[in-house]
Image (spheres, rainbow, N blue to C red):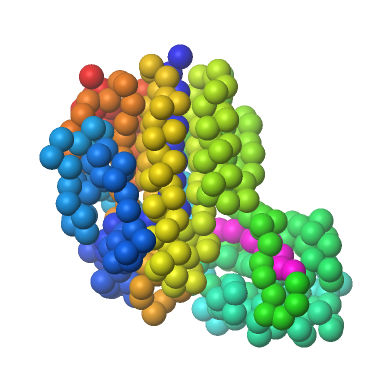
């Protein structure tokens, strides 16, 4: 029974792409920033070949890598979670999703206020932690919703859980998702609940409402062929549930790994697609180099458990969706290459796949391995890595 376990280390980029300066990201290198911390240690990823990837020179490569590895180029126009994951799943976005560097237009917010019955605060690009510091008290006094964006294509709504119950916040996000189409069609509407007293803290009950991919992805092809697509973390949200056969949400990287390990015990034929978001959400966007390094070290410490749980025909792929260099002045995503490490009994050791032309090579390769027909923007590398 063939199974693929695809784990996205959210935002773990491995160095600027050639067009990074067009995105304001010249010099960004997320993995090098994390590796500058004394808390950084990834010996198990090192054994698989992570530091043998083209351009990854922040640690010494393995003399005899146990896995296959590659550097992936993003062909899509952008650097956000949605189009990064869509490209991993085979869909290249030729046009960037809309962003709102000056805030959202009055016509959109007027309709949003009318449908929710609540006024709006902020309406600017903002750090998620800073916005609740600056507007949290006014929100508590007035009940107005904190609406903000970032350099990414997002419409974010922050609300204190004592002022706006979580289900009500989710309903407001559903309203925003319905309104944010066409020229306002942001990649994601995001619920950002928070709690406590000033300076407040965000809770784990974040929820993303994504656009549905405009074309079929590998998820649709796999589930359409009668196989399973298991989504861990925010994967189901990113794809708006399209092509997913079963899903589970997570509250942390550790929880995501636990739930992936649990599903590794389950008999299924298909793919388990996991997103571990803490690198991005807790550390990259907060410019926390030390936290980022510790989170990568924690993943590496759990990696032997994941490898030990692989069955005879299982393949493990570890990748990322963009960068988010915690050492730069920016708190936004960065336009970077991403890593790919491939392991499992069917995989040849020490295969350097070089620099690939698209994240979508993952989708093409997964479909080939699972023997599922489907059209992707990628080129399969399966014949190069299988024993």
Q: Dominant secondary structure of the magenta stretch?
A: strand
User: In the current view of this chain or complex, which residue is farthest to the front?
Assistant: 38
| Left or right: where 83 falls relative to 44 | right
Foreground: 326 or 187? 326
Q: Residue furthest top?
A: 1
Please tell me which residue is depicted at 76% across the width and 84% down the height of the picture: 137
Q: Position of residue 34 (x, y in %)?
A: 34, 63
Near-viewer residue (370 or 350): 350
Instruction: Name the residue: 63% across, 51% down.
Output: 251
Which segment did they paint magenta? 187-195
Q: Residue at x 27, y 25 (%)?
A: 347
Picture quarter containing residue 35?
bottom left
In the image, what residue occupies the spot 79% across and 59% down?
166
Residue reaching furthest to the left? 63
Quadrant where the image shows the C terminus: top left
Query: In the rendering, at what x and y percent does residue 255 appear?
Result: 58, 45
Does residue 122 appear in the picture of this structure? no
Q: Is residue 37 above or below residue 219?
A: below
Mark count:
0
Q: Is 33 situated above or below 89?
A: below
Q: Quadrant of residue 350?
A: top left
Q: Is residue 202 magenta?
A: no
């Amino acid at each position: 029974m063939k199974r693929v376990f695809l784990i996205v280390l959210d935002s773990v980029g491995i160095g600027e792409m050639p067009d990074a300066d067009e995105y304001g990201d010249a010099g960004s290198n997320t993995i090098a920033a994390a590796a500058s911390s004394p808390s950084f240690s990834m010996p198990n990823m090192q054994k698989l070949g992570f530091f043998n990837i083209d351009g990854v020179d922040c640690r010494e490569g393995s003399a005899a890598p146990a896995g296959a590895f590659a550097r992936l180029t993003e062909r899509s126009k952008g650097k956000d979670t949605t189009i990064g994951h869509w490209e991993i799943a085979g869909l290249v976005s030729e046009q960037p999703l809309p962003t709102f560097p000056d805030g959202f237009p009055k016509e959109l917010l007027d309709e949003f206020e009318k449908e929710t019955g609540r006024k709006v605060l902020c309406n600017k690009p903002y750090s998620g932690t800073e916005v609740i510091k600056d507007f949290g008290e006014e929100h508590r006094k007035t009940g107005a919703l904190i609406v903000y964006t970032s350099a990414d294509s997002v419409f974010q709504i922050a609300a204190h859980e004592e002022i706006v119950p979580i289900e009500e916040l989710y309903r407001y996000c559903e309203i925003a998702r319905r309104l944010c189409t066409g020229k306002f069609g942001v990649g994601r509407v995001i619920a950002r609940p928070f709690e406590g007293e000033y300076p407040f803290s965000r809770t784990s009950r974040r929820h993303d409402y994504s656009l549905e991919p405009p074309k079929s992805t590998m998820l649709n092809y796999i589930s359409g062929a009668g196989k399973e697509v298991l989504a861990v973390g925010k994967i189901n949200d990113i794809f708006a549930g399209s092509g997913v056969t079963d899903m589970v949400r997570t509250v942390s990287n550790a929880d995501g790994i636990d739930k992936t390990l649990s599903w590794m015990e389950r008999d299924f034929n298909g793919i388990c697609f996991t997103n571990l978001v803490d690198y991005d959400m807790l550390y990259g966007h907060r410019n926390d180099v030390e936290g980022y390094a510790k989170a990568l070290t924690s993943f590496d410490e759990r990696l032997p458990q994941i490898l030990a749980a692989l069955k005879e025909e299982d393949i493990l792929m570890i990748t990322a969706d963009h960068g988010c260099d915690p050492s730069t002045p920016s708190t936004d995503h960065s336009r970077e290459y991403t890593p790919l490490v491939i392991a499992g009994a069917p995989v040849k050791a020490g295969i350097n796949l070089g620099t690939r032309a698209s994240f979508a090579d993952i989708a093409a390769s997964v479909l080939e391995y699972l023997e599922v027909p489907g059209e992707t923007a990628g080129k399969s590398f399966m014949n190069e890595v299988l024993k």
